[in-house]
């Protein structure tokens, strides 16, 4: 009976571990600001679980790059 319980627990852990999303690149999040915004909201809502996930890190990096664009393409005109 105990072996059956351990087996069920092991299967449950494996199923939870399989719940991974595709990792998107920084370039993807730069090109898709809506997806970036949605991911940043998700990451901020659950920082304990999400903050170190690859997509959160990539979305944050894309946000940083978009704000500090060396070409200043995102800056409003002062004219």
Image (cartoon, helix red, strand yellow):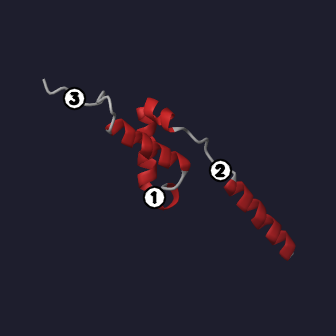
Disc on res. 47: 1
Q: Is residue 9 above or below residue 52?
A: below
Element at label 1 = helix
The answer to whether residue 32 shows anywhere in this view is no
Which is in the foreground here, disc 1 or disc 3?
A: 3
Q: Is residue 49 above or below residue 24?
A: below
Cα distance, mark 1 to mark 3? 31 Å
**Residue 35 in picture, x, y percent from top left:** 46, 36
Q: Which residue is mark 3?
A: 76
- 29 vs 17, left or right, is left
- 55 vs 41, left or right, is right
Q: Is residue 55 above or below residue 78?
A: below
Element at label 2 = loop
**Residue 46 in picture, x, y percent from top left:** 46, 57
Q: Quadrant of the N terminus?
A: bottom right
In the image, what residue occupies the spot 51% across and 56% down?
A: 52
Which is in the foreground here, disc 2 or disc 3?
A: 3
Cα distance, mark 2 to mark 1? 18 Å
Residues 19 and 57: in front is 57
Q: Which of disc 1 and disc 2 is earlier in sequence?
A: 2
In the image, what residue occupies the spot 45% across and 58% down?
A: 47
Mark 1 residue crowding within 10 angstroms, few (<14) / some (14–19) / many (20+): few
Element at label 3 = loop
Mark 3 residue crowding within 10 angstroms, few (<14) / some (14–19) / many (20+): few
Q: Quadrant of the C terminus?
A: top left
Q: Which residue is mark 2?
A: 19
Q: Which of disc 3 and disc 2 is earlier in sequence?
A: 2
């Amino acid at each position: 009976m105990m072996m059956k319980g351990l087996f069920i627990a092991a299967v449950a852990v494996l199923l939870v571990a399989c719940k991974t999303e595709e990792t998107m690149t920084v370039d993807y999040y730069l090109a898709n600001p809506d997806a970036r915004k949605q991911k940043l909201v998700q990451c901020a809502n659950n920082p304990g679980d999400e903050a170190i996930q690859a997509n959160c890190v990539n979305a944050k990096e894309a946000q940083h790059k978009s704000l500090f664009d060396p070409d200043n393409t995102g800056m409003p005109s002062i004219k």
